[in-house]
Image (spheres, helix red, strand yellow):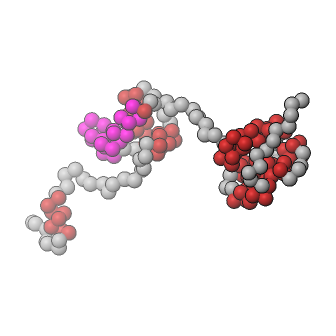
Amino acid sequence: MGSPLIVRSDLEAAELRRLARRERDGRVAARLIALANVLDGMTREAAARAAGMDRQTLRDWVIRFNAESVDGLRDQPRSGRPARMPEGQQATLKAIVLHGPDPERDGVSTWRIVDLCRIVEERFGVTYREGGIRSLIKSLGLSWQKTRPRHPKADKAAQERFKKGASPAR
Protein backbone atom coordinates (compact mmCIF):
# COMPACT_ATOMS: atom_id res chain seq x y z
CA MET A 1 0.00 0.00 0.00
CA GLY A 2 1.34 3.43 -0.98
CA SER A 3 1.53 6.54 1.13
CA PRO A 4 -1.73 8.40 1.81
CA LEU A 5 -2.56 11.22 -0.57
CA ILE A 6 -2.41 14.64 1.07
CA VAL A 7 -5.25 17.09 0.42
CA ARG A 8 -4.11 20.63 -0.27
CA SER A 9 -4.63 22.83 2.74
CA ASP A 10 -4.97 26.32 1.26
CA LEU A 11 -8.74 26.04 1.81
CA GLU A 12 -10.00 25.01 5.24
CA ALA A 13 -12.82 22.54 5.86
CA ALA A 14 -15.21 25.32 6.90
CA GLU A 15 -14.50 27.17 3.64
CA LEU A 16 -15.14 24.01 1.61
CA ARG A 17 -18.47 23.51 3.40
CA ARG A 18 -19.42 27.15 2.71
CA LEU A 19 -18.61 26.64 -0.98
CA ALA A 20 -20.67 23.43 -0.96
CA ARG A 21 -23.71 25.28 0.41
CA ARG A 22 -23.49 27.84 -2.40
CA GLU A 23 -22.80 25.30 -5.15
CA ARG A 24 -25.65 24.70 -7.62
CA ASP A 25 -24.34 21.35 -8.84
CA GLY A 26 -25.13 18.71 -6.23
CA ARG A 27 -22.35 16.41 -7.39
CA VAL A 28 -19.73 19.11 -6.87
CA ALA A 29 -21.23 19.94 -3.47
CA ALA A 30 -20.96 16.28 -2.39
CA ARG A 31 -17.31 16.22 -3.49
CA LEU A 32 -16.59 19.40 -1.54
CA ILE A 33 -18.19 17.98 1.60
CA ALA A 34 -16.21 14.74 1.25
CA LEU A 35 -12.99 16.74 1.03
CA ALA A 36 -14.04 18.86 4.02
CA ASN A 37 -14.66 15.66 6.01
CA VAL A 38 -11.17 14.42 5.11
CA LEU A 39 -9.64 17.73 6.23
CA ASP A 40 -11.55 17.45 9.53
CA GLY A 41 -9.83 14.12 10.19
CA MET A 42 -12.45 11.62 9.02
CA THR A 43 -11.00 8.50 7.42
CA ARG A 44 -11.01 8.38 3.64
CA GLU A 45 -13.32 5.37 3.67
CA ALA A 46 -15.85 7.04 5.98
CA ALA A 47 -15.70 10.36 4.10
CA ALA A 48 -16.24 8.61 0.78
CA ARG A 49 -19.15 6.55 2.13
CA ALA A 50 -20.76 9.68 3.63
CA ALA A 51 -20.56 11.38 0.22
CA GLY A 52 -21.97 8.34 -1.59
CA MET A 53 -18.82 7.33 -3.43
CA ASP A 54 -16.07 4.73 -3.31
CA ARG A 55 -12.72 5.38 -1.59
CA GLN A 56 -10.89 5.17 -4.93
CA THR A 57 -13.29 7.71 -6.44
CA LEU A 58 -12.59 10.08 -3.56
CA ARG A 59 -8.87 9.61 -4.20
CA ASP A 60 -9.37 10.60 -7.85
CA TRP A 61 -11.25 13.74 -6.78
CA VAL A 62 -8.47 14.61 -4.30
CA ILE A 63 -5.94 14.44 -7.13
CA ARG A 64 -8.06 16.73 -9.31
CA PHE A 65 -8.73 19.09 -6.39
CA ASN A 66 -5.01 19.31 -5.62
CA ALA A 67 -4.25 20.12 -9.27
CA GLU A 68 -7.11 22.49 -10.14
CA SER A 69 -8.76 23.52 -6.84
CA VAL A 70 -12.58 23.67 -6.81
CA ASP A 71 -12.81 23.88 -10.63
CA GLY A 72 -11.26 20.40 -10.81
CA LEU A 73 -14.32 18.96 -9.04
CA ARG A 74 -16.66 19.85 -11.89
CA ASP A 75 -17.59 17.25 -14.48
CA GLN A 76 -15.80 17.68 -17.78
CA PRO A 77 -18.00 18.29 -20.85
CA ARG A 78 -18.70 15.16 -22.82
CA SER A 79 -18.49 15.00 -26.57
CA GLY A 80 -21.82 13.26 -27.10
CA ARG A 81 -23.00 11.67 -30.28
CA PRO A 82 -21.48 13.08 -33.47
CA ALA A 83 -23.82 15.08 -35.66
CA ARG A 84 -25.36 13.33 -38.65
CA MET A 85 -24.73 16.33 -40.87
CA PRO A 86 -21.29 17.98 -41.08
CA GLU A 87 -21.04 21.68 -40.26
CA GLY A 88 -20.96 22.63 -43.94
CA GLN A 89 -24.29 20.93 -44.58
CA GLN A 90 -25.74 22.48 -41.44
CA ALA A 91 -24.69 25.92 -42.66
CA THR A 92 -26.32 25.17 -46.02
CA LEU A 93 -29.53 24.10 -44.26
CA LYS A 94 -29.52 27.31 -42.21
CA ALA A 95 -29.16 29.35 -45.42
CA ILE A 96 -32.05 27.42 -46.98
CA VAL A 97 -34.26 28.12 -43.96
CA LEU A 98 -33.33 31.80 -43.83
CA HIS A 99 -33.86 32.28 -47.55
CA GLY A 100 -37.32 30.74 -47.31
CA PRO A 101 -39.11 28.44 -49.70
CA ASP A 102 -39.87 29.12 -53.33
CA PRO A 103 -43.55 28.22 -53.75
CA GLU A 104 -43.06 27.03 -57.32
CA ARG A 105 -39.97 24.91 -56.65
CA ASP A 106 -40.66 23.71 -53.11
CA GLY A 107 -44.45 23.59 -53.25
CA VAL A 108 -44.92 25.44 -49.93
CA SER A 109 -45.13 29.08 -48.91
CA THR A 110 -43.57 28.65 -45.45
CA TRP A 111 -41.30 25.97 -44.03
CA ARG A 112 -42.81 23.36 -41.78
CA ILE A 113 -40.93 20.65 -39.92
CA VAL A 114 -42.09 17.95 -42.32
CA ASP A 115 -40.91 20.05 -45.26
CA LEU A 116 -37.47 20.46 -43.72
CA CYS A 117 -37.28 16.70 -43.05
CA ARG A 118 -38.01 16.13 -46.74
CA ILE A 119 -35.50 18.78 -47.89
CA VAL A 120 -32.73 17.34 -45.68
CA GLU A 121 -33.36 13.83 -46.96
CA GLU A 122 -33.50 14.90 -50.62
CA ARG A 123 -30.50 17.24 -50.62
CA PHE A 124 -28.19 15.65 -48.04
CA GLY A 125 -29.32 12.03 -47.91
CA VAL A 126 -29.84 12.13 -44.12
CA THR A 127 -33.10 11.01 -42.54
CA TYR A 128 -34.35 12.93 -39.50
CA ARG A 129 -37.51 12.62 -37.48
CA GLU A 130 -39.46 15.78 -36.71
CA GLY A 131 -38.02 16.09 -33.18
CA GLY A 132 -34.50 15.75 -34.53
CA ILE A 133 -35.03 18.54 -37.06
CA ARG A 134 -36.48 20.74 -34.30
CA SER A 135 -33.34 20.18 -32.21
CA LEU A 136 -31.10 20.80 -35.21
CA ILE A 137 -32.89 24.04 -36.11
CA LYS A 138 -32.62 25.22 -32.49
CA SER A 139 -28.89 24.37 -32.40
CA LEU A 140 -28.43 26.48 -35.54
CA GLY A 141 -29.77 29.49 -33.63
CA LEU A 142 -33.12 29.58 -35.41
CA SER A 143 -36.60 29.65 -33.90
CA TRP A 144 -40.05 28.79 -35.12
CA GLN A 145 -41.47 32.28 -35.13
CA LYS A 146 -43.47 32.83 -38.26
CA THR A 147 -44.05 36.10 -40.02
CA ARG A 148 -47.56 37.21 -40.67
CA PRO A 149 -48.79 35.51 -43.83
CA ARG A 150 -49.19 37.68 -46.92
CA HIS A 151 -50.98 36.84 -50.06
CA PRO A 152 -48.63 36.93 -53.08
CA LYS A 153 -51.10 39.03 -55.10
CA ALA A 154 -51.75 41.60 -52.34
CA ASP A 155 -51.80 45.24 -53.45
CA LYS A 156 -49.27 47.10 -51.27
CA ALA A 157 -50.41 50.54 -52.45
CA ALA A 158 -54.03 49.79 -51.49
CA GLN A 159 -52.89 48.58 -48.07
CA GLU A 160 -50.91 51.79 -47.48
CA ARG A 161 -53.88 53.92 -48.51
CA PHE A 162 -56.08 51.99 -46.11
CA LYS A 163 -53.59 52.44 -43.24
CA LYS A 164 -53.54 56.22 -43.83
CA GLY A 165 -57.33 56.37 -43.63
CA ALA A 166 -58.00 57.11 -47.27
CA SER A 167 -61.00 55.45 -48.83
CA PRO A 168 -60.18 52.50 -51.04
CA ALA A 169 -60.10 53.12 -54.77
CA ARG A 170 -63.16 51.83 -56.58
Kindly identify the residue that appears in the image at 74 percent across and 53 percent down: 11
Kindly identify the residue that appears in the image at 60 percent across and 40 percent down: 77
Judge whether residue 2 is colored magenta: no
Q: Is residue 103 left or right of residue 8?
A: left
Kindly identify the residue that appears in the image at 77 percent across and 49 percent down: 9
Q: Is residue 12 left or right of residue 72?
A: right
Q: Is residue 33 above or below residue 105?
A: below
Quadrant of image for the N terminus: top right
x then y, percent, for residue 57: 79, 38
Instruction: Name the outermost residue toward the bottom.
Output: 165
Instruction: Name the outermost residue toward the left.
Output: 170
Kindly identify the residue that appears in the image at 69 percent across and 56 percent down: 23
Quarter where residue 106 is shown: top left
Q: Is residue 48 left or right of residue 81?
A: right
Q: Is residue 70 left or right of residue 159?
A: right
x then y, percent, for residue 133: 47, 39
Quadrant of image for the C terminus: bottom left
Magenta highlight: main SS: helix
Foreground pick, 77 / 3? 3
Q: Is residue 100 visible?
A: yes
Q: Is residue 28 above or below residue 102?
A: below
x then y, percent, for residue 25: 68, 52
Foreground pick, 94 / 25? 25
x then y, percent, for residue 132: 51, 38
Q: Is residue 130 visible?
A: no
Specify the segment rendered in magenta.
88-110
